[in-house]
Image (spheres, rainbow, N blue to C red):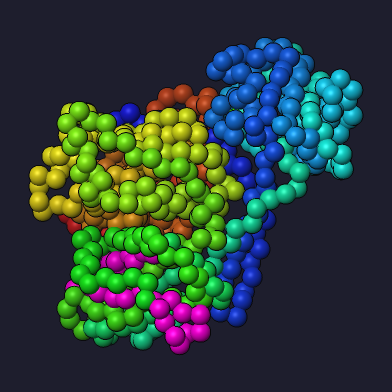
Amino acid sequence: MKRFGILILAATLGAGFSNSVHIQAAAAEQTSIKIPTNLALGGKATASGEYAPHQGKDKAFDQDIFSKWLTFNSPAWLQYEFPDAKVVTSYSITSAEDEPYRDPKSWVLKGSNDGTSWTQLDVQQNQSFTSRHQMKTYSFSNKTAYKFVKFDNFHNQNGSGMLQVSEIKLYDGSSKEWSTTKPEVAASGENKPNNTKENLVDGTSVTKWLTKDNTAWLTFDFGNSVTIDGYSLTAADDRPERDPKSWVLQGSNDNKNWTSIDKKSNEIFKVRHQRMYYLLDNNTAAYQYYRLSNMKNHSGNSMQLGEVEFSRSNDIGHAINPKIEVQILDSKGIGKIFKKALPNAEKEILAVARKVHEMLYKSPADAPVDVKKILVTIVDSPEGVAWTSGDATLKTVGFSAQYLQKFVESPAKSLRDEIIGILYHEIGHVYQYSNFDVEAIADSLRYRAGYHDRYSARKGGSWETHGTANFLRWIEDTKKRGFIRELNATQIPYNIGGENEKRLWKERQIKLITGTDVQTLWSQYQATLPN
Ligand SMILES: [Ca+2]
Ligand SMILES: [Ca+2]
């Protein structure tokens, strides 16, 4: 399958400012994070110099670590004017993607209300950035609101020549809190010790719940009332006849009186580990308990599931909220089949975007960019399938109308599943940070969500040329949970030259993360595959 036109993203994750609180409640398990509010929004930047327009002063305040402000003369100054005066008490500076000598070394931060008389707020000297796109945060005490802040006497590491920063954020200590809750599960039955009900909410479809019955119910207790706007069921590893075929989703606040929310009567999971997402478009009531009741399998005497997830309005994942827009632009209007396959396309694409983000980042606070909008277009393109382009705030995912047309002409296949699979891949590109084999990482997400058949992989080749995506997925599932996130947090150093050096660097990263040599992992993986 041919794909093209992929935008490669880069740089370090903005860690270091999120608080994690782990509360072991009586039933459900809750984690919350605080994302600090960046005040550098909607204001005006001025500077002693800039390399406009591509490396202009605005690039220091555009919420995008992949763009930078560069000035040819150090020392320099950089000023930010807020729309309204703010009480700034901390700030972060993120280094750019290359040339460490251009990083800031010393500066004075000043505040002013008229742009003329200045009060010193913070002084830093002998600072250094040990990696590219590294974010460093500085705090100071201040109780006065200022309309202007200015980084003055801004020196680079060399003392003269160019100075550059990729991003500056300004904070007043306010933040927004998000939490995630792992529910307590109750079930009509389970198969101890390996296929227990807890396996339904452990974050991977590799572990499963199984009951030796053709009917079942499952209850999920969140500890508090929460509204959900969707839920997903992920198929287990084998035996499709054990998949749930029908169920009723209900909500309750006392675990006794139940209200029906959704009903399915003939669901078919076409690929093992397929994650089927069900949108609840008009659901506004909050419930503490959710129940999959009257579950029936396809046939036989057992039922099983890999994972059950609920999309909660207060969840960390909902901090990811890009505007989604779909435009049918092809000359013959073929693109209408896209909307027919995904009737509520904007909301379904948002759900994929949130899942992809979760697969790439532990928390939205760790993500290097904040994509504001994803525009999905269906266009004339006789070649290719889909592609992603754009800057950090607006991404465009293109689909070939001709490809969709050809696909829909093979009735054995589901256009809906194909589109969702492509979305896992392309939205992977929208959010990925690492330049480590961008195609393989994006495709590993598609495998993980069950929109490529991982069991169709065959023995042969080497790790970097033959089925790399499923190999990465296999490491994630069997060797190291969070492996793909850690891989996505790496960045091939800008000064690494040849292909061989790059390969050795990649192999070192895999060993660093997993503790195992890549050739050993590859041999173990090969042993799991049929000839
Ligand atoms: Ca920037
Ligand atoms: Ca599981």
Q: What's the residue at 29%, 57% (across, down)? A: 450
Quarter of the view holding residue 498: top left
- Image position of 469 with respect to 229: above or below: above
Q: Position of residue 52 (x, y in %)?
A: 59, 14
Q: Which residues are magenta?
A: 230-259
- Image position of 188 with respect to 351: above or below: below
- In the image, taking residue 296 as reference, residue 363 lies left or right, namely right
Q: What's the residue at 63%, 46% (across, down)? A: 15
Q: Position of residue 6 (x, y in %)?
A: 36, 31
Q: What's the residue at 33%, 70% (across, down)? A: 262
- Image position of 448 with respect to 323: above or below: below
Q: Quadrant of the N terminus?
A: top left
Q: What's the residue at 55%, 44% (across, down)? A: 367
Q: Position of residue 87 (x, y in %)?
A: 81, 40
Residue 29 shows in the view: yes
On whether residue 144 falls in the magenta region, the answer is no
Q: Position of residue 63 (x, y in %)?
A: 59, 34
Q: Camera-side residue: 192 or 62?
A: 62
Q: Camera-side residue: 346 or 529?
A: 346
